[in-house]
Each structure stands twice: as structure tokens, then as C-alpha cells.
Image (cartoon, grey):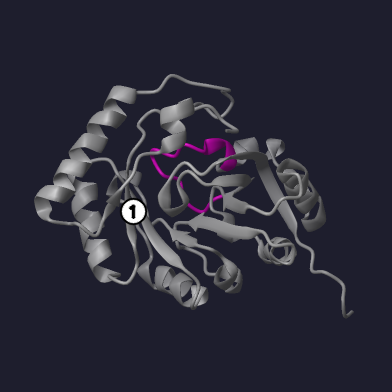
């Protein structure tokens, strides 16, 4: 039927904001977060287990597109801003109708995924953040699927964001960036102290994170890897591992 907006049923772990984007290309920008439940990876250092593990499925709300959209507009006061879709892996769900609904009202949508599931609506993102998981995660990227994600993005902005915990991750990140020279690359020191999923807050190894940041900056500069942008998780520096900020 013409004129009837598309609808999808999304499994929502949490919707919160406005807050600031804490990492990557949009760091510091105002955003509303829509975190979807479910993931096809099980990274050893995942900091969002409440949106990944099936044992927390009972905490995820099944919401139709319009209900999610109403929550976004209520939080943003109806003022267009960037909506960040995250997870888990949000690409395993159909975010297309939500993105089209929001774009029609002037909102911008960014999404981060490991690049394991390609979607035609990637071309509507600003930007598509591709974050392949390094060796420390215990996962092995499928580069054919990753390339499919890039193809799905088309002319839309796409960036590469890689979490680095150690020398092995760093060398892997350099190899990946060399394979995708057209993609801006952002490096992020890993956070070794993810909160328990049920916790409102948790202690953070700030010294460890600071040391890794210092090492990563020094390492890239010593190598002359001047194209890489090394950024912290700003939200962790401000709020630690507290959820919903």
C-alpha cells in the first residue's frame, strides 16, 4: 500500500540520551543511543554483555519502529541530532525503517558493526563505522563479508575503528588499515574492565587505560603512522563504566 511507512520489530536493550558520542569519528557530538540486543560475536573483552548474551534477552524490549522513534524524539525534544545505533551487532536486525523514519525528520544516523552482516540501508548512514575485531577478541573476521558491508555502504561515509589492547593487535591493525587505505582509521585503547551486565557502575582500571593510550600514541608516532587517529573512550574517562550515559 502506497504511503504506509515500513515497520520492523526491534529488540531493544536500551535507549538513552542525549549524551555525547564517546568514541570514533563523532566523538564529543550530542547523540541519542539506541542499543539493540543480540550479536553474532562473543568477544573476550566485550563491554556490552547485557546487549549480547542470550541470558539477558528477558531485559530486551520488542518495539516497533514508531515506538522507538517516539522515544528518540521524546529524549531529543524533537530537535534533530545524530542517533547512534549500537549493540551487540545492530546489523543483525532491520534498522532500515527506523533510519528512513528519522531521516525524513532531519535526524542523522550512525551505526557501528564488526562488518559481519551487510545491509542495503548502510548507504543511509552518516557514518557507517566498521570495527573488525582484533586477535585479542578471540574472533576472526570474515573479510568477504566485511567487503560486502563496504559495498552496501556505496557512497556513504565509512570509517575503520579498531580496538587495540597489545602489540599483536597493533600490528594486526596496521595490516588491516593497509588493506583499506581509503578508509579513515581510528585506533582506540582497550578497556580491560567491562562492568557486569547487571551493574549500574563498576570500578575502572583508569591507570591501565591511560598507560595503553600513552603506549598507542607513542607507537603510532614512532612508526610514522600519521594517518591513524588515536582516541580514548571519552565516556569512560568521564563516567567510567556506568551504563546509560
Residue positioned 32% across, 59% down in the render: 185
Q: Quadrant of residue 94?
A: bottom right
Residue positioned 36% across, 34% down in the render: 191
Circle 1 is placed at which residue position? 186
Q: Secondary structure at mark 1?
A: strand
Q: Quadrant of residue 77?
A: top right
Judged from this view, the residue extending furthest toward the right is 1
Residue 193, horizontal then vertical, whole percent:
39, 28
Give 48 or 17, whichever is nearer the viewer: 17
Residue 90, horizontal then vertical, whole percent:
58, 55
Crowding near the residue tagged with mark 1, few <14, some 14–19, many ≥20 C-alpha atoms within 10 Å? many
The magenta span reads 39-51
Horizontal arrangement in the rendering, residue 55 relative to residue 218 (left or right): right
Vertical side of 64 occupied by 74: above or below: above
Quadrant housing the C terminus: top right
Vertical side of 59 occupied by 71: above or below: below
Horizontal arrangement in the rendering, residue 96 relative to residue 30 (left or right): right
Q: Magenta segment: does it hold 227?
A: no
Amino acid at each position: 500500500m502506497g504511503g504506509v511507512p515500513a515497520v520492523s520489530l526491534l529488540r531493544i536493550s536500551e535507549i538513552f540520551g542525549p549524551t555525547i558520542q564517546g568514541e570514533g569519528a563523532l566523538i564529543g557530538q550530542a547523540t541519542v543511543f539506541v542499543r539493540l540486543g543480540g550479536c553474532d560475536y562473543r568477544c573476550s573483552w566485550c563491554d556490552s554483555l547485557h546487549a549480547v548474551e542470550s541470558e539477558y534477552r528477558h531485559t530486551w524490549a520488542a518495539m516497533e519502529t514508531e515506538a522507538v522513534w517516539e522515544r528518540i524524539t521524546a529524549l531529543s525534544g524533537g530537535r534533530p541530532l545524530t542517533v547512534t545505533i549500537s549493540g551487540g551487532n545492530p546489523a543483525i536486525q532491520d534498522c532500515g525503517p527506523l533510519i528512513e523514519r528519522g531521516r525524513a525528520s532531519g535526524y542523522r544516523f550512525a551505526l557501528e558493526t564488526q562488518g559481519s552482516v551487510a545491509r542495503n540501508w548502510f548507504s543511509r548512514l552518516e557514518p557507517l563505522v566498521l570495527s573488525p575485531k582484533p586477535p585479542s577478541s578471540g574472533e576472526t573476521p570474515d573479510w568477504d563479508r566485511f567487503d560486502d558491508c563496504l559495498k552496501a555502504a556505496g557512497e556513504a561515509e565509512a570509517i575503520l575503528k579498531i580496538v587495540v589492547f597489545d602489540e599483536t593487535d597493533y600490528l594486526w591493525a596496521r595490516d588491516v588499515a593497509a588493506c583499506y587505505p581509503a578508509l579513515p582509521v581510528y585506533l582506540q585503547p582497550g578497556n580491560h574492565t567491562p562492568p557486569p551486565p547487571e551493574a549500574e557502575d563498576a570500578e575502572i582500571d583508569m591507570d591501565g587505560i591511560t598507560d595503553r593510550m600513552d603506549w598507542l600514541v607513542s607507537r603510532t608516532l614512532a612508526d610514522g603512522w600519521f594517518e591513524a587517529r588515536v582516541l580514548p573512550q571519552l565516556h569512560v574517562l568521564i563516567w567510567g563504566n556506568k551504563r546509560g550515559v
